[in-house]
Amino acid sequence: MNLAGVAGLFLVKAAVVWALSDVPTNENFIARAQVTATVLGNFVYIDGGRVWQIDPDPVLNGFIFAMNSTISIDLTKTWTSRSVALRTIPKPPEIASRCKGHVWTDTGSNGSFYSWGGYWGVAARERVDETPRLYKFTADGNGGGNWSIVPSEEISPFGVLDTLHPAEAGAFATTSDGVGFVIGGKATPWTEKSRQRLEINGTRAHQMVPGMLSFDIKTKTFHNTSSSPALSGETNEHNAIISAVAHYVPGYGKNGVIVLLGGVASPVDKDVDAKFSEPIGFRNLTFFDPVTKESFWQMTSGEEPESPRTFFCAVGFDAGDGRYDILFFGGQNEERDLYYADAWVLSLPGFVWTRLENIPDEWAPGGRGMHSCVRVGKRQVLIIGGLFKSDRDPVPQGLLLFDHMSGGYGLRYEPNDEPYQSPSNVKAFYEKG
Ligand SMILES: *[C@@H]1O[C@H](CO)[C@@H](O)[C@H](O)[C@H]1NC(C)=O
Ligand SMILES: *[C@@H]1O[C@H](CO)[C@@H](O)[C@H](O)[C@H]1NC(C)=O
Ligand SMILES: *[C@@H]1O[C@H](CO)[C@@H](O)[C@H](O)[C@H]1NC(C)=O
Ligand SMILES: *[C@@H]1O[C@H](CO)[C@@H](O)[C@H](O)[C@H]1NC(C)=O
Ligand SMILES: *[C@@H]1O[C@H](CO)[C@@H](O)[C@H](O)[C@H]1NC(C)=O
Ligand SMILES: *[C@@H]1O[C@H](CO)[C@@H](O)[C@H](O)[C@H]1NC(C)=O
């Protein structure tokens, strides 16, 4: 190699200090948010959303950090958020990442999940799919897997896909029988391309999606009902629920139940901000039977979590003796422009609310919203990413763990703990009768 060549090589090396990455180094990592996450076998899969990072070339990259791969984390070994191995699984270019989307998990075989809706994290509208599509990720049992587009001819009823809005910010859950749900949500020009379908009085607009969409994984059948289980009568006809959280509780009733938490009700015929929508409180809760679609309501006792509350996350644990605890963390209050740092447990069948420890300020400056969470190990909750009132996520890689039985919040994942037990004040509630 001649001298000019060596000099050229040196220049190139000096100029490209680092490249944008879906898994930036701890030093370059700023924040991660609006992801979906699920657990398949021994791995957590994190998909979609954005990853903000220290940008080597802000002019070129324009601060757009859409995730271009799916991340997996091994749950068989202990790790800490600082040292965790994040494996990236590339996505084919036709399966661009979306934010605030919905995921339906199939635990059969080595596991797979379906990705439905969400907005495109890359600003260019050219990336938005021309027609609605359903994506599938098939895990390989070793922390890897493949993405594919589910062919529309495999989906029933024939042609249904083209009639649906793959919206963002719906409440979603999957039953143990493999039926996925999305309740409500919002369609925008960034969730679908067709302008005509998103017009209100001749103007392109955000459009609230009323009702409830279900997808049977076994038969690949979509079913859309125009009424939503969370809203009653008159309200139901004119409103859709946005940014609520749905949680499937197995073993309650014949078919289990899906409990709806938080969110706001927005009118379907107006383009209104969540700020100006009706809050859905935590005192009178709605749940429904995922098979019969029959809905029920139940008043709760205990201190009521503050609302309006959107973009929080919930997980559930079997607490023994026929009891079940739903834990939820933080969230956003769009009306007052704040994030919550509190955490709660709703214990069933008592329908009693109990406060958990707040997320410490050290790890959620001014609260945390737009995060996701999954159950990991025997009894830990992995809280993934989020936004807060700070320039940077103080949690390495945005991976915060919670375990009320061993000190609350932390950065260490431990696969071999004892099984989950309810907090003592929840147990005390049942002991009192
Ligand atoms: C993902 O790809 C898009 C389009 O090429 C790019 O704009 C974006 O910066 C990439 N994201 C990351 C984190 O590398
Ligand atoms: C993923 O795709 C590769 C190449 O097409 C194929 O060999 C492999 O079997 C696929 N794996 C799964 C889990 O579908
Ligand atoms: C399931 O995972 C195991 C490894 O854990 C692998 O040997 C097997 O081929 C996988 N099956 C499929 C259908 O991918
Ligand atoms: C379901 O049907 C209702 C009523 O026709 C419609 O307004 C809504 O947009 C549909 N949902 C989806 C996800 O397309
Ligand atoms: C659309 O037009 C109807 C009838 O004029 C009106 O009542 C409604 O408020 C309009 N909606 C919006 C979003 O402007
Ligand atoms: C609880 O909400 C439902 C509608 O979801 C309503 O029918 C019921 O009357 C409410 N219960 C009370 C006690 O307010």
Image (cartoon, grey):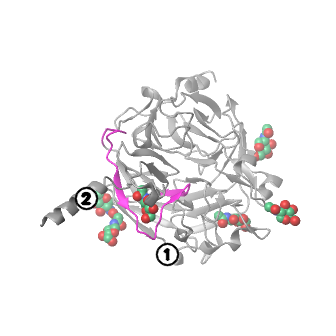
Q: Secondary structure at mark 2?
A: helix
Look at mark 2 in the image and give the residue it sits on.
Answer: 11
Q: Does residue 75 appear to the left or right of 385 in the view shown? A: left
Task: Tell me residue 171's x, y (percent).
Answer: 61, 52
| Residue visible at 55% across and 73% down in the picture | 155
Return the residue nearer the eye: 180 or 388: 388
**Magenta stretch bounds:** 77-105
| Amino acid type at mark 2 | Leu
Q: Which mark is residue 151?
A: 1
Task: Tell me residue 277's x, y (percent).
Answer: 75, 48
Q: CA distance from mark 1 to mark 2?
A: 47 Å
Residue 357 lies, with reference to residue 398, above or below; the image says above
Q: Quadrant of the N terminus?
A: bottom left
Return the residue nearer the eye: 294 or 82: 82
| Amino acid type at mark 1 | Pro
In this view, the mark in front (1 or 2): 2
- Corner quadrant of residue 183: bottom right
Q: Are marks 1 and 2 in contact (CB under 8 Å)?
A: no
